[in-house]
Amino acid sequence: MSAPSDAADVGAGEIADVPSSPDLGYIRRKEDYLRRLRRIEGQARGLQRMVEDDTYCIDILTQISAMTKALQSVALGLLDDHMGHCVTQAAQAGGDEARYRLQEASDAIARLVRS
């Protein structure tokens, strides 16, 4: 989520003085995330081949389900890292930064639930 550039860009419920980006909470698990995302990328290529090869639709759907779960796992890990690092630091700082990071996390959760 990008921060508004000035108060004129702020929508309802947003905070005008948005803090700069925090340190990345996932940095200690970056290589693990990259490895998992590369595996998911391979799954996507495999799905393309399955369609090209006229694979039975249920088999394709099974692989799509596996890929979706893998993406959800990465998303939940990133969310956990964000809550444990970025949001925790902001909560300790308090003020607008804390409110902004909590709202940011809440918005991210809402997007994940809708997907």
Image (cartoon, helix red, strand yellow):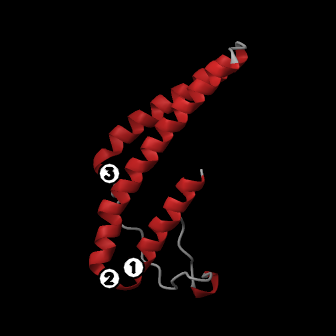
Residue displayed at 47% across by 36% down: 70
Question: What is the number of the mark on residue 19?
Answer: none
Residue 9: x percent and y percent? 63, 81
- Out of 107 and 21, give the one closest to the viewer: 107
Q: Distance between the residues labelled 3 and 1?
A: 21 Å
Residue displayed at 60% across by 55% down: 114
Question: What is the number of the mark on residue 97?
Answer: 1
Residue 25: x percent and y percent? 33, 57
Q: Nearer the viewer, mark 3 or mark 2?
A: 2
Q: Secondary structure under badge 2?
A: loop
Q: Looking at the picture, which amino acid does disc 1 mark?
A: Glu
Residue displayed at 30% across by 61% down: 84
Residue underneath mark 3: 27
Residue underneath mark 2: 94
Marked residue nearer the N-terminal end (3 or 2): 3
Residue 29: x percent and y percent? 31, 45
